[in-house]
């Protein structure tokens, strides 16, 4: 007897592998969410200070890597200051991920570490820590990720509190979107944009519709749209075919399972009637 | 009884701390922002120390299994302990967080395990979905229809098959799920306010051992 679960897993593997080897090239339409996200970054004036809440994990790398490269390259192209920090409970490994897998892949232009960008590292505690950072960064942060005192980093002269932030970009930190809204947006009016997962958008939408979050980029499809918008096709565009094939497979499996359930039910009813 | 074991002390500290933070948020009182800022910084220090407590706790729990040679467990405990000690020591070796041994541990070993687990998770999700979405009742029918609409909204092919799928999916997101989500946010916020009131009145005793 064939195990149904095994068949499902084999089919899943096939619909993931096939489009990677033979891209279908389904059209990707630009949605309003992605366009707003793109506009927020493009509208940054010179000398802006962008705080990137980077809380990517190695597990989430298939999503985080293409997005970080797309946003990172776009930010590093502009004459702005960029500060990276990790504050989520799951963000302990994020600074290492940033240093080892993201920064080496980015086109840093002529940006200088400590002057134009900095990686502050991981700060545990979530909401109280974020509140403390928003009020006075220098009272919480003593050194950057490399152990350099922030007094020796010229970029930190521009970043004293949440009032100095031109835009907050959340990558992997949408799980605490409510915390950032409470501690950054409500008291200081900090504009915030987030990358969210398909599931995470349900939590983010009320804040988006209330105007407390300016824009969200939804999952791999949103990242693919963003890659198209900035004219840098990357891994997300390649992955969007896989999203289609896996979703269609699940729809088919659910329909077939329901048909077989009702057919079996009908058959057992008719056989019972025949026995009587 | 030692004065340090008196549950009134942590309850009192929590009440006073909460009062300071609330007053600082709503009122402009001289010196209060400095006090509130100091309290927030203490919290960050406490949380950082908490990681150390976690280290000691893991040592205690798994150390016991290793010493007692608990059958079916002690080898796993040994692996967990060795992995933890390896990551801590290599993580602290200069350059901090970037030593090749640390990067190997996190970038090669942990990354591979994480990605494998994530891939397995997608299999479980598929199996769970087709088992759970057999329409046996009206409620399951509603959930199944919503799920199918959302699947086709979130995939580029959905819009190619029929332009109406994104409209249905967006309607579900904005009105059905969005409404429920707002309800959850309001409920959680009210819960936080009530917990705060209990804290201020000294009725919240769980953390004080009450």
Image (cartoon, coloured by chain):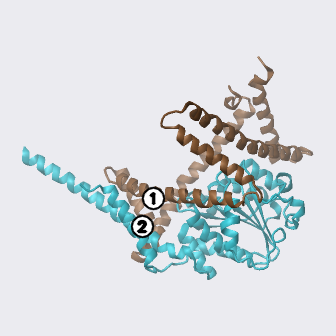
Chain colours: A cyan, B brown
When asked about the image quadrant of residue B188, the answer is: top right
Find numbered disc 2 in the image and state the secondary structure of the residue it sits on: helix
Q: Are marks 1 and 2 in contact (CB under 8 Å)?
A: yes
Q: Is residue A203 at all visible to an observer of this figure?
A: yes
Find numbered disc 1 in the image and state the secondary structure of the residue it sits on: helix
Closest to the observer, B27 or A180: A180
Closest to the observer, B187 or B132: B132
**Which part of the image, by quadrant, shows the C terminus of chain A?**
top left
Outermost residue to the right: B30
Outermost residue to the top: B1
Q: Chain of mark 1?
A: B
Q: Chain of mark 2?
A: A
Q: Pinpoint residue A199: horizontal percent, then vertical percent.
A: 53, 59
Closest to the observer, A29 or B46: B46
Checking the image for residue A134, the label placed there is: none
Pointer 1 residue: B122
Q: Pinpoint residue A197: horizontal percent, then vertical percent.
A: 56, 62
Closest to the observer, B38 or B137: B38
Outermost residue to the bottom: A231
| Left or right of residue A46, residue A215 in this image | left
Pointer 2 residue: A246
């Amino acid at each position: 007897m064939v195990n149904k679960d095994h068949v499902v897993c084999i089919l899943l593997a096939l619909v993931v592998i096939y489009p990677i080897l033979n891209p279908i090239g389904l059209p990707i339409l630009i949605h309003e969410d992605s366009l707003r996200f793109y506009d927020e970054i493009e509208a940054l004036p010179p000398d802006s200070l962008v705080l990137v809440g980077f809380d990517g994990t190695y597990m989430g790398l298939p999503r985080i890597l293409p997005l970080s490269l797309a946003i990172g390259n776009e930010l590093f192209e502009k004459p702005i200051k960029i500060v990276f920090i990790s504050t989520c409970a799951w963000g302990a490994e994020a600074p290492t991920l940033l240093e080892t897998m993201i920064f080496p892949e980015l086109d840093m232009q002529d940006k200088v570490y400590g002057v134009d960008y900095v990686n502050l590292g991981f700060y545990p505690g979530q909401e109280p820590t974020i509140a403390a950072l928003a009020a006075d960064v220098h009272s919480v942060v003593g050194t950057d990720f490399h152990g350099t005192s922030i007094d020796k980093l010229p970029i930190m002269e521009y970043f004293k509190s949440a009032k100095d932030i031109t835009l907050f970009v959340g990558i992997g930190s949408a799980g605490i979107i409510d915390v950032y809204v409470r501690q950054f947006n409500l008291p200081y009016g900090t504009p915030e944009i987030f990358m969210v997962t398909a599931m995470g958008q349900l939590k983010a939408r009320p804040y988006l519709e209330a105007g407390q979050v300016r824009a969200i980029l939804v999952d791999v499809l949103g990242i693919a749209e963003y890659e198209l918008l900035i004219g840098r096709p990357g891994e997300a565009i390649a992955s969007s075919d896989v999203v289609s094939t896996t979703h269609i497979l699940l729809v088919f499996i659910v329909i077939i399972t329901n048909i077989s359930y009702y057919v079996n039910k009908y058959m057992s009813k008719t056989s019972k009637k025949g026995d009587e | 009884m030692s004065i340090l074991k008196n549950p009134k002390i942590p309850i009192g500290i929590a009440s006073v701390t909460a009062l300071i933070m609330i007053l600082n948020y709503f009122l402009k009182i001289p010196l209060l922002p400095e006090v509130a800022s100091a309290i927030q910084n203490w919290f960050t220090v406490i949380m950082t120390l908490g990681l150390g407590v976690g280290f000691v706790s893991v040592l205690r729990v798994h150390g016991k299994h290793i010493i007692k040679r608990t059958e079916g467990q002690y080898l796993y405990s040994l692996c967990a302990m060795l992995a933890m000690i390896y990551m801590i020591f290599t993580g602290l070796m200069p350059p901090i967080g970037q030593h090749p041994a640390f990067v190997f541990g996190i970038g090669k070993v942990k990354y591979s395990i994480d990605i494998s687990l994530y891939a397995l998770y997608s299999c479980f999700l598929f199996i769970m979905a087709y088992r759970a979405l057999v329409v046996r009742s009206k409620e399951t029918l509603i959930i199944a229809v919503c799920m199918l609409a959302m699947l086709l909204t979130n995939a580029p092919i959905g819009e190619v098959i029929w332009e109406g799928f994104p409209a249905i999916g967006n309607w579900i997101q904005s009105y059905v799920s969005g409404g429920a989500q707002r309800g959850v946010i309001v409920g959680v916020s009210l819960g936080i306010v009530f917990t705060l009131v209990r804290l201020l009145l000294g009725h919240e005793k769980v953390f004080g051992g009450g």
